[in-house]
Image: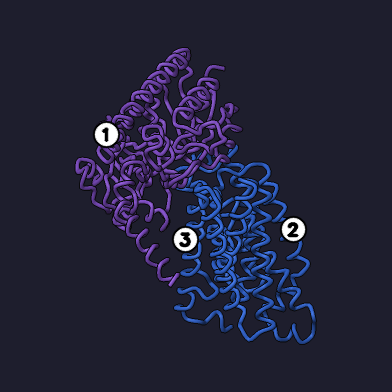
Chain colours: A purple, B blue
Amino acid sequence: MKTKRMLLKSAAVILALTVAGPAAAQANKPIPVVATFSILGDMVERIGGEHVAVATLVGPDGDTHVYQPTPADARAVNKAKVLVVNGLEFEGWLDRLIDASNFNGMRVKATDGIEPIAFEEGDGHAKHDDDEKHKDHEKQDEHAKDDDHGAFDPHAWHSLSNAVVYVDNITATLSKADPSNAATYYMNRAAYVAEIEALDADIRAIVAKLPADRRTVVTSHDAFQYFGRDYGLTFLAPQGLSTEFAVSAKAIANLIEQIREQKIPAVFIENISDPRLLKQIANETRAAIGGTLYPGALSAPNGPARTYLRMMRHNATALARALGS
Amino acid sequence: MIWDALLQPFADYGFMRRAILGSFAISVGATPVGVFLMLRRMSLTGDAMAHAILPGAAIGYLIAGLSLGAMTIGGLIAGMAVALLSGLVSRITALREDASLAAFYLISLALGVLIVSTRGSNVDLMHLLFGTVLALDDAALILLCSITSLSVLVLAALFRLLVLECADPQFLRSVSGLSAFAHFIFLMLVVLNLVGGFHALGTLMAVGIMILPAAAARFWATSVGSLVLVAVAVAMFSSLIGLLLSFHYSLPSGPAIILVAGVAYGISLLFGPSGGLIAQAMPRRHSEV
């Protein structure tokens, strides 16, 4: 008798939970959001705060170019209400992941509305096979037909004015997915954008002090075109744009020649590329090794670039220190 | 001038000098080992071993970062373990050595990939493991040259034993207890040279410089000694030309070196006097005399 009553009771509880569940969840349970890599994840956390539960696919110090999604990623994407992606073919593996996971939430392309920088011709970047059709940006596809890579440089977050566009896109989509908290999202956005603009002014002030002949930098991964455009610096790299490219002796010789001729003061090691190559180049040219720049991922939580804003500040100060000395 | 094209890159750039020194060291160390692999019909063992050391090096990388020592030791342990275990199994049980080697290297590879993907940050590990000959630092060069010296000395000491083991393993086993010993020492040399090679050329390319020159030499020489000499010459030639092509025509250096060795193999296949295609098609007057 006792067991039967308990059974009934628990059945009632389960029924109550299933009926009440969705309604209750909408009021106070954070909405599941998936961001493709750490920088987007950080932005979503700043905007969403406690109202979102962010899962980041490519974690700190990870290389998004060559990432291979796992089944756990597909599960996370499947459950997500909002999927935040960079776009500009940065996540070459994304379309397959979305197909595989039956994602039916909202997808926001953070780079929507920025002014992308086109790749220069003849750079020879190795890129992911572009056989997938991108319905949402046909214009890009037309370009991509001519080349074997995406037409634009995807590392757009290195411009703080682009970051504001990122933040606006994310805020708009979060508010659409979760209208009850939209006011909070827009409040967080305003605070965040203020910080971004303050940092932008700081970096401009730092970079403005650099003399005109000390504005060229060598890095191991050609990812700083947007940074260069915003702040008037030139970035050279021994590799092409993507990290999966095998390097030729000619490319290195050319770079060494350029460092010698232009008396480039510093080379930078990045957190996601082979540092041995840059050390060799530094030895050969007696350029200083300027420290670590973070091109495509945040550092681990105890590192110097654990948030997007810290990353941008770190990169700018490291550059200014090496170039100014 | 042609000498400008050949020598100027090495005069101008330290990284080219390091690259040629590193690849010459590999040519002298790994290629003789490749000759013996070929003679013992174990050419594919080199490839299997290359896969077997990869996970060990990966684990070394995960523990100590991009440290030459940790990656070398990890690779050595994984390679030795696979070599010893497969040898042991083939000697104790009915399973042949090729099958047990295949089993163990696949297990090792799968284990390595598993550990890397569950524990590592998602740095492109293959990129790090597939070293480039253009980024050899002092430590890597010293390691390469040490491995080459050790390898040459051991080969010299065991030369007769190894030749006998290649020619008539049954005979050697019947007259001497050294057969198993020679076999394991030899496998260790294979592992050692592959571990050295992956720092410079990357794991798979290291197999290429080991096997291709040996296969090419087979069409030019008949005695073991001359096979070794020709193979080393082909390997050094391929390294030099490959690096120069990489320099003048913007080709990635590792594949360029191996492809030159591949072309050398193709030419040998056609024109080699000892069993080459054209030599076989010609009337056999000279060889009968």
Residue A12 placement: quadrant: bottom left
Residue B30 quadrant: bottom right
Q: B7 and A208: which one is in front?
A: A208
User: Which residue is more in the foreground, A312 or B288?
Assistant: A312
Residue position for label 1: A172
Residue annotated with mark 3 = B263
Identify the element where label 2 is drawn: helix
Relative to A152, residue B289 above or below: below
Check if mark 3 and mark 2 are on a common chain: yes
Identify which residue is drawn at 51% across, 26% down.
A314
Which quarter of the figure is the C terminus of chain A placed in?
top right
For the residue labelled by badge 3, is the local secondary structure a helix, a strand or a loop? helix
Amino acid type of the residue tagged 3 in the rendering:
Val
CB under 8 Å between callouts 3 and 2?
A: no
- Foreground: disc 3 or disc 2: 2
Residue on which the image places disc 2: B150
Q: Is residue B35 left or right of residue B261?
A: right
Q: Nearer the viewer, mark 1 or mark 2?
A: 1
Residue A113 left/right relative to A295: left
Q: Position of residue A286 (x, y in %)?
A: 60, 27
**Chain to which mark 1 belongs:** A
Residue A183, given in percent of the width and then of the height, sits at 29, 29
What's the CA distance linking mark 3 and mark 2? 30 Å
